[in-house]
Amino acid sequence: MNKTPPQALENIRICDFTGQLAGAGATKILAAFGAEIIRVEDPVNKGKWDILRGVPPWVGEARGLEAGGAFNNHNSGKLGITLNLRDERAREMLRDLVRVSDAVTENFAAGVMDRLGFGYKDLCQIREDIIYVSNNGFGATGPYSSYKSWGPIAQAMSGLTHTSGLPGLPPAGWGYSFMDHTGGYYMATAILMALLHRRRSGEGQWVDLACIEAAGTLNGVASLDAEVNGRGMRRADMPNSNRSQSPLMSPHGIWPALGEDEWVAIAVRNDRDWEKLTRVAQQSWAYEERWKTVRSRVDNEAELERLIGEWTCCHDKRELSQLLVAAGVPAAPVLKPQERIEADDRTDGLWVNVEHSQIGPSKVEGLPISMSETPWSLESGAPCLGEHNQYVFGELLGRSERELETLFEEGVI
């Protein structure tokens, strides 16, 4: 008889105030490995703590506070409760929940939890070894802690926005908030490290995470180049697009393929790769002497890229990349996100179907991790507002059904 594999975090409980992506993405990772994530929301200002709850893209034909696609994706596998923390009865119930939780997580602006009476010092009075995690744009401490943040603002302050764009043109920025993802990854890691520390020492701690710092780690070579060589990004001698100067490679980039908005990626690493490409291309110009060395290819890169584009645009992106790979040249079709989801290969299990209590089956992102002994699992969709009040307040905290009915009628839960 097959036994269900144990989950790595199945005995961990987190009282979760996070929203959007940077925080909710972190606790979703923990939920996938079995942690009990209890998401706290406001029954009065419904959906205001996490605006993704009721905004498109929608899940299927559903609409409203339970149908936000991003919300359902970032919060699958979690439980949901509602507490009106303006009421002392709700605050006392939250204290009871903290007593049986391993960590409290939030990504409000700095000071919000303190004003609610649940900052780190307050939480330590409730549970001495509590782990408290703050994750917002500018951090809970430091010179920018009073700043209010949204994705483009923190991204601009991090230096990341300036790195995208062509020389002589304004910064293009990054359309998707990679720093929120990065902040979520760091947050999940920090929670695990704090749990490990407490296991060894018995001590809780406060984790203060700022997304501008998480985004700063994505600047990579740009920061090093500026510090060591005094050179900025997007200067006149910087390579455009995907050209490679270090190490020197050419051709190296993206070219049009057959069809509307279809592209193929090709990377010729050295002169041997170029010889292999010429045999696949079978174009007369490819055999000219000026293309035989990487130095001469780089010196005439604009014309070379034009000629390659005239060749690739007549070929299917998948077929052409297969031919190049078979010849020993690194290449790949440029897949659209929907093509990546539909691909029948290693990442086929990355997207999973979960069951939402109101919407029904929906597809969400899983985790790009395969573990032989403690695999991740996501089966339930994101919680509806207050969906698990009965379980948390009744079964977990011992409130009677009659008391819960009264608290609901009076707007406390």
Image (tube, grey):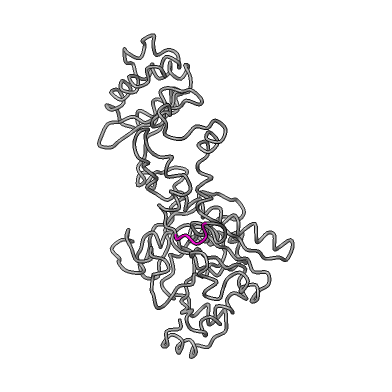
Residue farthest front in this picture: 143
Residue 251's quadrant in the figure?
A: top left
Residue 402: horizontal and vertical position, in percent? 48, 91
How many numbered discs sit on the rendered protein?
0
Answer with left or right where residue 60 lies relative to residue 220. Answer: left
Identify which residue is drawn at 56% across, 73% down. Answer: 118
Identify which residue is drawn at 40% across, 40% down. Answer: 164
Identify which residue is drawn at 51% across, 78% down. Answer: 391
Residue farthest left in this picture: 260
Residue 145: horizontal and vertical position, in percent? 52, 60
Q: Main secondary structure of the magenta part?
A: loop
Magenta stretch: give its range: 144-148
Position of residue 88 relative to residue 71, above or below, is: below
Residue 65's quadrant in the figure?
A: bottom left
Residue 36 vs residue 132, the one in the foreground: 132
Residue 122 vs residue 9, the one in the foreground: 122
Residue 253 vs residue 392, the one in the foreground: 253
Answer with left or right where residue 308 lies relative to residue 383. Answer: left
For the N terminus, the image quarter is bottom right
Position of residue 369 relative to residue 264, above or below, is: below
Answer with left or right where residue 27 lies relative to residue 66. Answer: right
Q: Is residue 252 magenta?
A: no
Residue 141: horizontal and vertical position, in percent? 57, 60
Residue 216: horizontal and vertical position, in percent? 52, 46
For the C terminus, the image quarter is bottom left
Answer with left or right where residue 396 lies relative to residue 167. Answer: right
Residue 104's quadrant in the figure?
A: bottom right
Residue farthest right in this picture: 201
